[in-house]
Structures are given as C-alpha cells and as structure tokens.
Amino acid sequence: MRYEPKPDFKEKIDSLLKDGEDAEEFWKTIETPLPKTMRCNTLKISPDKLKERLENKGWKISQPYNNKEIIVLEGSLNPGELGKSIEHLLGYYYIQEISSMMPILALQPKENDLLLDLCASPGSKTTQAAALMDNKGTIIANDVNIGRIAILAANTERVGATNIIITRHDAVQLCQKLKKINFYFDKILLDVPCSGEGNIRSNPATFKMWNKKVIEKLSRMQRKIAESAIPLLKEGGELIYSTCTHSPEENELNIQYLIENFDLKIEESQLPIKTRPGLVEWQGEKLNEKMKYAHRIYPQDNNTEGFFLCKMKKIS
Ligand SMILES: C[S@@+](CC[C@H](N)C(=O)[O-])C[C@H]1O[C@@H](n2cnc3c(N)ncnc32)[C@H](O)[C@@H]1O
C-alpha cells in the first residue's frame, strides 16, 4: 500500500538534502522496490563457494562492493524463494539489507572480544559479528521483546553461531545490573529503536506513523539507552550508535549530547558503500566538527534503505 509523506516530513528531508535534484532522486528512489540482498555467512561457507552454488541453481547474483560477503540478487525469484532455499535453511546466507550490514563493518569486532549488542533482535548484526569473530570471544545479545528474541535464537542457531549469550531485559535495566557487577565490554553496538524513516521502501506505513512527538520520545529513549551502556565500555573500547532513520534528533543531536557528557570521542571508520558525512550543523545549532566522521546513508546513493551510524571510542 502506498502512503503520501506528511508535509513536515517532506520539508525535513528536503532541508537535509538541500539540493533539489538530490531530493528528487530521494523521493524517486523510495518509490522503487528494494533490491534483494544477502550476506554470506562465513561461519559456514566462503563467498566464492556460495556464489558458485547459487549460480548453479540458476540465480543471477553480483558482489558489487569491495567485500564479497555482500551479495545482491540481480534476477528475480519466485515469491519466498530466497527464504525457502536449502542454502538459506543451512545458514549459508543471511537475508540482510546492505545498509544494515554497515555498523558491524565499522565496529570490526575481533576474535576474543567481549561484545554487547543491546538491542539485538532479530539478530542481523549479532550473527554478522559472530562470523567476523569466527565464533570466538563472547557476544551478549539482548532484546526486550520476547517474540523477537525467539527469532534471534532461531537465526543464531541457523547460522551456527556459538559465541552468543541471549538475554531478555530492558536495555537500561540490563546495563544497571552489569554495572553493579563491574562487567565491562571491548565493544558495544547500540542499534537503537528508531522512527524508521530509512525503512520507507520496505515499510511505507512509516509515513503514516511519522510525527514530531514520536521522534522526540524516541530520541529521549535512545539517549537513556546510550547513557546506561557507555559506563560498561572499557577504556579504549569502541561503540557504534546506529539507527535506520534520517532524523538528526535521533542521530547527530544524540551523539552531540553523548560526547558532551561522557568520555567519548568520535572515530573515523571506512565503509564499502557511498556514505555522506554526519551533519556539523542542524537548524542553526553548531555540532562537534568530528560529526563529519559519522555516516549518513541515503537510499539514492547505493539503492539501499536509509541509515545512520557513528563510531565512538572511550577515552579515559
Ligand atoms: C532496530 S531494532 C534492532 C535490529 C537488530 N540490531 C538487527 O540488526 O537485527 C531495535 C530493537 O530494539 C528492541 N528494543 C526496543 N526497546 C528496547 C529496550 N528498552 N531494551 C532492549 N531492547 C529494546 C526492539 O525489540 C528491536 O528488536
């Protein structure tokens, strides 16, 4: 079903993009279907072997980025075929949108790291991290929603990830409990709940739900989650804050608040897709100049959904 953007949403996107042609591209792109994409699960198969297997089935695929694990389905399949294939059931690939793969590529968890994934379900990024860590080290994957936890558990099992401990808590409460027992992490992923402006291509109902009050409420919730997680980061530890939304109130303004109130600095990170710098100014408010190292991902740049992420490091 198609929904029209509300006038203030349209105005906001247009003012973020500034250039009229660019904004036009944005609105055009979100009307087009999202390409089907997947991530090779290197815990079970190499990208080259998976490519061969899928091509032998007659699938047309490409690996257009400087990372062969990112696979784009070029031809069309029967409805549901991507999820029903034997390769999917065996956990050889994970159906994942390309922009959603970026936080873990920026975080680069290593073997033997202790990683906290605070809002983890359904597990796209948790399972990606487990693969990069080669099933070594430990990931605490938490989510508050029991239904989504069940999907996280099923995905973890399907991909053969064995270094994941799943917990079901409110993020703030879990962090308070871990702080009490002095439990610290090398890396933290905060893939927080958000207004989902970036998911409009796959979920046009976002247009209907969108309003400024919801954004304010989410922004406060995101800050609370981040504030409770940051004390759990080891000195020198790294954290990714990410959302699937374009709204500066849920992105740069939250990062600005965090770096002003905690011992955190924004770090540069390299990604294989085109991204744009984070905003260094929004509605007259000047932001930290390192905000340019945050990544804004717009649908028209790589034919993906929209996304935001920022890497930070604990300095003392
Ligand atoms: C953007 S989604 C996470 C997607 C996930 N990281 C992935 O890549 O598959 C946000 C998640 O936060 C969870 N969530 C919402 N409020 C929460 C809270 N207070 N504590 C923990 N998780 C929460 C939601 O249930 C949802 O699964």
Image (cartoon, rainbow, N blue to C red):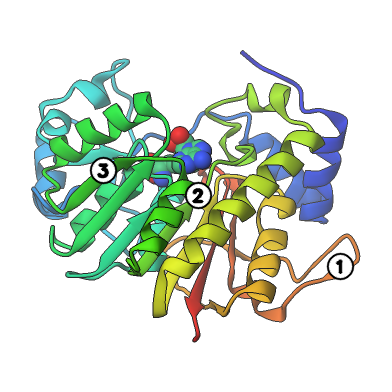
Q: Position of residue 129 (x, y in %)?
A: 27, 56
- Residue at which label 2 appears: 172
- Residue at which label 3 appears: 166
Look at 30% across and 42% down and name the residue there: 167
Identify residue type, mark 2.
Val
In the picture, residue 56 is in which quadrant?
A: top left
Q: Which numbered disc, 2 or 1, marks the residue that appears first in the sequence? A: 2
- Residue at which label 1 appears: 285
**Regarding mark 1 in the picture, which secondary structure is present there?**
strand
Q: Position of residue 196 (x, y in %)?
A: 60, 37
Give the spatial CA distance, label 3 vs label 2: 16 Å
Give the spatial CA distance, label 1 vs label 3: 40 Å
Horizontal arrangement in the rendering, residue 7 relative to residue 305 (left or right) = right
Give the spatial CA distance, label 2 vs label 1: 29 Å
Q: Residue furthest right?
A: 284
Badge 2: few (under 14), some or many (20 or more) residues near its Cα, within 10 Å? some
Horizontal arrangement in the rendering, residue 42 relative to residue 99 (left or right) = left
Q: Is mark 2 within 8 Å of ligand 1?
A: yes
Identify residue type, mark 1.
Glu
Q: Position of residue 128 (x, y in %)?
A: 27, 52
Look at 69% across and 75% down and name the residue there: 260
Look at 34% across and 69% down and name the residue there: 184
